[in-house]
Image (spheres, helix red, strand yellow):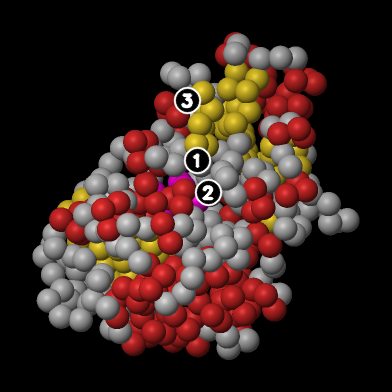
């Protein structure tokens, strides 16, 4: 690929100086580090193993709550939810008195690295498995943006590209499949090969991680297939930065049944009415998690009871952290006007929900595996090329998953 712009650009306090090589950042949705450990241990990911040897592999802290919209927004902006404003997949808009999906770019409060790169002359492409992310990720973008979920609906005037199936060489996949993520990676390879993009953000989906544990053959085969596409990108001269939006854990009891605390029901039984529990993990993909994760927020109609409620919740088995709005916004980096009066996180094997009637566990494709809390906060960070001295020191500190563009671009110069 020739004529790749090396013009520097700045966004959200960071200046990026890209090399004249394709830059590819991948969000390996739901990829807890043990998924990579297992596949590399069985030599199913030789390309990723080589990246770890010649480049860098470590751990990074994600943005809490450890959900998809939150962390994809952080990755493409390089800042925390307190700055970019996306604090869940779903929230209660107090001003409108409505519970709404947070899928629109209207909720994004800062510009993206992707749009800034395009303005600086890079050929930018965003490919996401889930359509729900496309609007946020393509905010102000002059480039290509489409989802695997609706690839066959992409048009030049709205997506920057048409006839995607012909470009990629694969049919639009089912969203509840391994192919949904593999299509994204294959699209990335095709866009580089055809000279259509030289600066890419590829966001996968976590259906497989919600459905299969790391040591299953289904997981091993899935990551092996991903690795083949990584190898193709490396052969095309790409610098790759890979991370995850969150980890994944089984949320079950010893008998295999879902381990759920219905917080609104608990509060009503103890204190009566006056509580609204919001599950920010809520999204259209019910087979993933049944809208159950390890983080919820609580809105109280009577704030005079907040200390009493907070203390009581904090002592309930399975609840690990409870914060009021001020403390939670500081510790969890949340936008104060879009969160609840209380923020509640649960244990590694526990999910928190609203009421039993609000969650359809029959829709799950497998056992309950989910995310959202502190135990899914640490995620892999892999850079394909060697880090320079400055970024080796940064890697030894407290890197965040939303530093991945900075590491891939500035850290490899």
- As rendered, which of 192 and 211 lies closer to the eye? 192
Residue 152 position by quadrant: bottom left
Quadrant in the picture for the C terminus? bottom left
Q: Earlier in the sequence, mark 3 or mark 2?
A: 2
What is the distance, in whole Å, between disc 1 and disc 2 at their CAs? 7 Å
Q: Earlier in the sequence, mark 3 or mark 1?
A: 1
The 10 Å Cα crowd at callout 2, few under 14, some 14 to 19, many 20 or more, is: many
**Seen from this angle, which residue lies furthest right?**
255
Give the number of the mark in front: 3 or 2.
3
**Which mark identifies residue 88?**
1
Tell me the SS state at disc 1: loop
Residue 268 position by quadrant: top right
Residue 319 visible in the shown view: no
Tell me the SS state at disc 2: loop
Quadrant in the picture for the N terminus? bottom left
- Magenta stretch: dominant SS? helix
What is the distance, in whole Å, between disc 3 and disc 1 at their CAs? 12 Å
Q: Which residues are magenta?
A: 67-74
- As rendered, which of 204 and 389 lies closer to the eye? 204
The 10 Å Cα crowd at callout 1, few under 14, some 14 to 19, many 20 or more, is: many
What is the distance, in whole Å, between disc 3 and disc 2 at their CAs? 18 Å
Tell me the SS state at disc 3: strand
Expressed as whole percent of the image width and height from the top left, the position of residue 207 reads: 61, 60
Relative to 85, is 124 above or below?
below
Answer left or right for 220 relative to 121: right
Q: Residue at x 58, y 22 (%)?
A: 299
Expressed as whole percent of the image width and height from the top left, the position of residue 86 reads: 42, 40
Residue 121 position by quadrant: bottom left
Q: Which residue is mark 2?
A: 67
Expressed as whole percent of the image width and height from the top left, the position of residue 234 reads: 35, 83
**Which mark identifies residue 93?**
3
Q: Residue at x 56, y 60 (%)?
A: 175
């Amino acid at each position: 690929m020739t004529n790749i712009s090396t013009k520097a650009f700045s966004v959200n306090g960071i200046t990026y100086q890209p090399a004249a090589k394709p830059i590819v950042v991948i969000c390996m949705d739901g990829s807890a580090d043990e998924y990579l450990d297992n596949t590399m241990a069985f030599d199913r990911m030789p390309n990723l193993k080589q990246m770890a040897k010649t480049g860098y592999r470590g751990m990074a802290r994600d943005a809490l709550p450890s959900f998809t919209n939150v962390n994809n927004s952080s990755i493409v902006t390089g800042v925390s939810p307190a700055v970019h404003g996306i604090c869940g997949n779903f929230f209660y808009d107090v001003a409108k008195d409505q519970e709404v999906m947070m899928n629109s770019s209207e909720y994004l409060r800062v510009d993206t690295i992707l749009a800034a790169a395009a303005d600086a002359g890079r050929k930018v492409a965003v490919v996401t498995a889930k359509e729900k992310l496309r609007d946020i990720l393509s905010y102000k973008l002059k480039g290509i943006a489409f989802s695997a979920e609706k690839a066959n609906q992409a048009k030049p005037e709205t997506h920057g590209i048409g006839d995607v199936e012909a470009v990629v060489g694969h049919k639009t996949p089912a969203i509840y499949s391994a192919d949904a993520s593999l299509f994204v990676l294959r699209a990335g390879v095709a866009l580089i090969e055809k000279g259509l993009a030289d600066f890419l953000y590829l966001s996968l989906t976590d259906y497989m991680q919600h459905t299969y544990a790391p040591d299953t053959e289904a997981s091993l085969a899935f990551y092996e297939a991903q690795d083949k596409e990584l190898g193709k990108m490396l052969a095309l001269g790409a610098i790759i930065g890979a991370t995850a939006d969150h980890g994944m854990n089984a949320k079950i009891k010893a008998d295999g049944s879902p381990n759920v605390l219905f917080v609104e029901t608990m509060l009503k039984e103890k204190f009566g009415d006056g509580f609204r529990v919001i599950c920010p993990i809520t999204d259209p993909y019910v087979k993933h998690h049944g809208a159950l994760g390890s983080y919820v927020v609580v809105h109280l109609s009577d704030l005079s009871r907040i200390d009493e409620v907070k203390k009581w919740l904090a002592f309930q088995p399975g609840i690990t952290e409870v914060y009021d709005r001020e403390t939670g916004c500081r510790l969890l980096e949340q936008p104060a006007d879009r969160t609840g009066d209380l923020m509640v996180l649960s244990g590694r094997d526990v999910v928190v929900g609203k009421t039993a009637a609000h969650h359809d566990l029959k829709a799950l494709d497998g056992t309950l595996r989910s995310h959202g809390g502190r135990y899914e906060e640490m995620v892999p960070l892999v850079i394909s090329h060697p880090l320079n001295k400055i970024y080796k020191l940064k890697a030894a500190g407290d890197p965040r998953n939303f530093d991945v563009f900075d590491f891939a671009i500035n850290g490899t110069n």
